[in-house]
Structures are given as structure tokens and as C-alpha cells.
Image: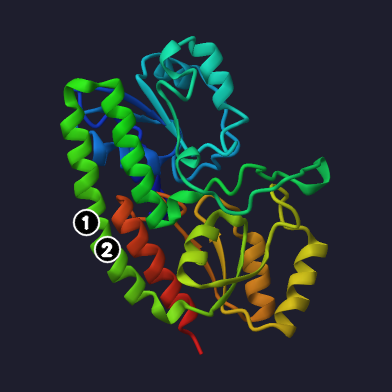
């Protein structure tokens, strides 16, 4: 039943939010569909992926090409998160609106300072991102900056509704200022806790909340947990206090469950984006749910 609810919620995110649109938005991930809806509530918005899919690895199927062909703007994470499929969609859609960043191609990572940039990369490092960690939607301060930049881009593309886009971004900024204060107060007990994560998906969130990451379940980014690596993490857990093991809704939980059982540490599934849990129906509830799940998992003695 839980899985069915997730699928229904994720499917709902792929539906157009309005048929009376000033802009047609192609959102690469659910978080950008949700943000676009806040800035342009009258837009027609299509989401290319769901919270139950790994956004690194998506097939450029005909349905996505058709949606991109109609888009005025494509809103994506950037920092090469979608490098395996977005360029194919751009090429096959042949839509001039979404070919360049000075028009309708909007990368959130280009609007802020990313963390964990790499000066040099090589194939032995795994699936890394030289331009920095692309999962920036889990930092509320960065999200406010992205919202303002997105409103300005939409205003440029659709000047008739400029005042509406800018006013909605201003409203979002004011509301998020209040929510950020509440989140930081609620999450204060998390500061100094130590986690093992599956991947670097939650690094922005954990860095913001002062939570330590001891290691990843992945031996290298993009590689599944190996027996040898899990054994090394078990050894680590015997030397270092680990409060919880976390993984995203779309990730295989077997490695986390194995380590949880062996190390006696709780393993929890977290929503990576909007629709990743029954409680995360929008960006605000996504942050609410993440903090409450982390508090519950790390409160065990």
C-alpha cells in the first residue's frame, strides 16, 4: 500500500498543473516542477522524472522528447546531473527555445555556489560532478536564490506576466525566511549527529543542519555497495558512533539494511525530492518530513 501511494503521488507530479498557461515548463526533476509552480502557478508544467527514479540515469524516451519540443523553458538541476539524457532530449526535440542558457535552458546550479567542486576528475573516481554537487534543492538558502533567478528568467521569456513572476518569488522568499527559522529551531538536536549516507544526495541538507557524514554506502559515486565496502563500514561503525544510516526513496535499501542489522544502527528512507514520501507533497512539506524523519531516527539512545 505504501508503494502504491508513492507511485500515485509521483504520477500526479507528471500531470500538467494548468491548461491555461502563459509558459510551458519542462522540469527535469520534481523539485523544479514544484518551484516553477510557485513562481508561475498558471504555467503548464511537465516533470521528466519522479521521486522514485534516479535522476542520473533516465532514458530519453519519445514521450519526453515530445514534451520538450513544446517547452518554453527547461528547468533542471545542472552541474551535469542530467548529462546522460538531457542533451539527447535537446537534440531530438529540435526546440530552439531550450538549447542555450541565455534563453529557455535554466540550470539551478548556475545560479548559486555549489559545494564539492572538483578541479580534476578521472574515470577511477566514479560518477562525480566536476561542477559541484547538483543536489542543491536541499539547501533552503540556495533555493531562495534560485527562485529569484527563475522568476527573472520567466519574466524575460514572458514579459506580459513579469510582475506576477517577480511578486511570487518575493512572496516565496518571505515565506521561506519564516520556515527557515522554524526548521533550524526544530532541527537543532541534529547538530553534531553522525550518519552514513548512500550517496551525496543529502549533503546540502546535512551541511546546513550541522550533521556529519562518516561515509557513503557507495564505495565510489554511482557504484552499488559491495560486500567488501560494507564490511569496512561495519568496522568503521565499531570505532565511530553512527547515529543512523540514510538512503533515498529511489535507492536500493539492501546494503543499508544489512549494515543496520550488523551494526545495530537504524536505517531510514528519506524523500530525496517532492513525492518521495507520503508527507512530502510540496517543497515545504519535503523539508518538514526530512527533518522529522532525521530527528526520529537519531533520537534513539
Is residue 268 positioned above or below 94 on the image?
A: below
Q: Name the residue rendered at 62%, 56% in the picture.
A: 199
x, y percentage for residue 125? 78, 48
Q: Count of labels shown?
A: 2
Splitting the image into 4 quarters, where does residue 131 fall? top right
Q: Secondary structure at mark 1?
A: helix
The residue to which callout 2 is attached is 179
Q: Residues within 10 Å of mark 2 (few under 14, many from 20)?
A: some
Q: Residues within 10 Å of mark 1 (few under 14, many from 20)?
A: few
Residue placed furthest toward the bottom:
301
| Residue 203 numbered mark, or none | none
Q: Name the residue rendered at 75%, 46% in the picture.
A: 126
Left or right side of 37 for 131: right
Is residue 219 positioned above or below 171 on the image?
A: below
Splitting the image into 4 quarters, where does residue 233 fall? bottom right
The residue to which callout 1 is attached is 175
Front position in the image: 71 or 250: 71
x, y percentage for residue 265? 60, 78
Instruction: Quarter of the image for the N terminus: give it.
Output: bottom left
Amino acid at each position: 500500500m505504501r508503494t502504491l501511494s508513492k507511485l500515485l503521488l509521483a504520477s500526479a507530479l507528471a500531470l500538467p498543473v494548468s491548461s491555461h498557461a502563459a509558459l510551458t515548463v519542462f522540469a527535469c526533476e520534481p523539485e523544479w516542477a514544484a518551484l516553477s509552480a510557485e513562481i508561475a502557478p498558471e504555467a503548464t508544467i511537465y516533470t521528466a522524472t519522479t521521486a522514485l527514479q534516479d535522476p542520473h540515469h533516465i532514458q530519453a524516451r519519445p514521450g519526453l522528447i515530445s514534451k520538450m519540443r513544446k517547452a518554453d523553458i527547461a528547468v533542471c538541476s545542472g552541474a551535469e546531473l542530467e548529462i546522460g539524457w538531457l542533451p539527447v532530449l535537446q537534440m531530438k526535440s529540435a526546440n530552439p527555445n531550450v538549447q542555450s542558457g541565455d534563453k529557455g535552458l535554466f540550470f539551478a546550479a548556475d545560479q548559486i555556489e555549489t559545494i564539492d567542486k572538483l578541479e580534476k576528475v578521472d574515470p577511477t573516481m566514479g560518477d562525480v560532478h566536476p561542477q559541484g554537487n547538483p543536489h542543491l534543492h536541499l539547501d533552503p538558502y540556495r533555493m531562495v536564490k534560485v527562485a529569484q533567478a527563475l522568476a527573472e528568467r520567466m519574466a524575460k521569456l514572458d514579459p506580459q506576466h513579469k510582475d506576477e513572476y517577480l511578486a511570487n518569488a518575493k512572496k516565496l522568499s518571505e515565506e521561506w525566511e519564516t520556515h527557515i527559522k522554524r526548521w533550524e529551531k526544530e532541527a537543532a538536536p541534529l547538530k553534531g549527529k553522525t550518519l552514513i549516507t548512500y550517496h551525496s544526495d543529502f549533503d546540502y541538507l546535512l551541511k546546513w543542519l550541522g550533521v556529519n557524514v562518516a561515509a557513503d554506502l557507495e564505495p565510489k559515486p554511482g557504484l552499488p555497495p559491495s560486500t567488501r565496502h560494507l564490511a569496512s563500514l561495519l568496522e568503521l561503525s565499531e570505532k565511530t558512533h553512527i547515529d543512523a544510516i540514510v538512503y533515498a526513496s529511489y535507492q536500493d535499501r539492501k546494503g543499508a539494511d544489512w549494515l543496520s542489522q550488523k551494526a545495530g544502527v537504524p536505517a531510514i528512507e528519506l524523500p530525496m525530492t517532492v513525492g518521495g514520501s507520503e508527507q512530502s507533497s510540496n517543497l515545504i512539506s519535503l523539508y518538514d518530513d526530512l527533518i522529522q524523519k532525521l530527528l526520529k531516527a537519531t533520537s534513539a539512545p
